[in-house]
């Protein structure tokens, strides 16, 4: 990673960004598609800056186009730095058939003061503009994020800004981390380190806010018919689980274990009925081979 966020040790232990050649990525994607793989996730510390070291400029949009052309049915990527998420990449969600309407976009804090101290080169308004753009294109777009609580100097008002951002964005998943000191990082020597009991309290509160945010997002999807890729059997509960395109985990009951086993790695049409656990309970309407 090249970003050197003030809390993060990754640049010190893993070094600078290195991009694989585009042709190699496309060839690997084709091999997976030919082998029957249904979904690929492109993974990098900051996927949006892909290609800057090889080609002199970011070319992540080209990667997305190449993997889509390889024949993969579902395409996702993580992780994205908000400062590098371009309009070109955002626009591909509407034009590439395989690119799913879901994005992990770490904000880290809802406070402009804390974001500046973290060396995150965007503010709350810029982040919210991205969210608005995505939701205007698709109101059911699935967004998840990372937030650090208890960063050095974080005041109650800063923390409340993080809570309100989670509420406003209606994230389907909020990953919450209590700040911990890392050697070599700038934040380690900052003043105003937050007491452990305060970090614990803030973490618990934000977990509740994040849970309600996810439940609100799931509830907005109630009644929709979604294409679900089935992935796992929960035999003790007689449930088969999978994910919608906007990354809602769906639980579908089954009666015949052998038939359910045969549906793994297959797409089915599911009506989303109710919020449950960490996702939604659904009713299978038809299997893909019946479409």
Image: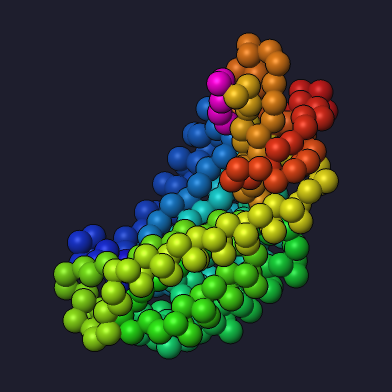
261 vs 191, left or right, is right
Magenta highlight on residue 97: no
Q: Position of residue 8 (x, y in %)?
A: 29, 69
- Its colouring scheme is rainbow
Identified at 70% across, 16% down, the residue is 255
Residue 61 visible in the picture: no
Q: Is residue 150 visible?
A: yes
Taking depth in this image into account, of 90 and 280 the one nearest to the observer is 280
Q: Which span is picked out in magenta?
A: 231-236
Q: Is residue 22 above or below residue 262?
A: below
User: Who is closer to the viewer here, 155 or 103?
Assistant: 155
* Residue 3 in which image quadrant: bottom left
- Position of the C terminus by quadrant: top right
| On screen, residue 238 above or below 178 | above
Q: Position of residue 272 (x, y in %)?
A: 76, 41
Q: Residue at x 48, y 85 (%)?
A: 157
Q: Residue at x 53, y 38 (%)?
A: 30
Left or right: residue 94 compared with residue 234? right
């Amino acid at each position: 990673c090249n970003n050197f966020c003030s809390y993060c040790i990754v640049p010190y232990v893993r070094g600078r960004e290195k991009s694989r050649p585009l042709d190699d990525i496309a060839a690997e994607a084709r091999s997976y598609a030919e082998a029957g793989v249904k979904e690929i996730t492109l993974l990098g510390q900051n996927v949006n800056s892909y290609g800057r070291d090889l080609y002199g400029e970011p070319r992540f949009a080209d990667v997305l186009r190449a993997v889509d052309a390889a024949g993969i049915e579902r395409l996702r990527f993580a992780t994205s730095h908000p400062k590098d998420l371009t309009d070109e990449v955002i626009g591909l969600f509407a034009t590439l058939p395989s690119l799913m309407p879901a994005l992990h976009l770490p904000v880290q804090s809802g406070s402009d003061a804390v974001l500046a101290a973290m060396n995150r080169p965007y503010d709350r308004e810029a982040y919210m503009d991205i969210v608005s753009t995505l939701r205007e294109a698709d109101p059911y777009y699935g967004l998840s994020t990372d937030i650090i609580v208890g960063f050095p100097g974080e005041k109650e008002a800063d923390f409340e800004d993080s809570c309100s951002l989670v509420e406003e964005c209606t994230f389907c998943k909020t990953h919450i981390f209590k700040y911990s000191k890392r050697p070599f990082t700038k934040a380690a020597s900052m003043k105003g380190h937050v007491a452990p009991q305060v970090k614990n309290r803030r973490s618990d509160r934000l977990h509740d806010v994040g849970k309600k945010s996810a439940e609100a997002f799931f509830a907005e999807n109630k009644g929709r018919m979604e294409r679900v890729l089935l992935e796992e059997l929960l035999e003790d509960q007689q449930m088969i689980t999978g994910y919608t395109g906007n990354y809602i985990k769906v639980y579908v009951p089954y009666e015949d274990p052998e038939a359910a086993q045969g549906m793994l790695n297959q797409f089915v049409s599911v009506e989303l009925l109710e919020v449950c656990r960490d996702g939604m309970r659904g009713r299978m309407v038809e299997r893909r081979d019946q479409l």
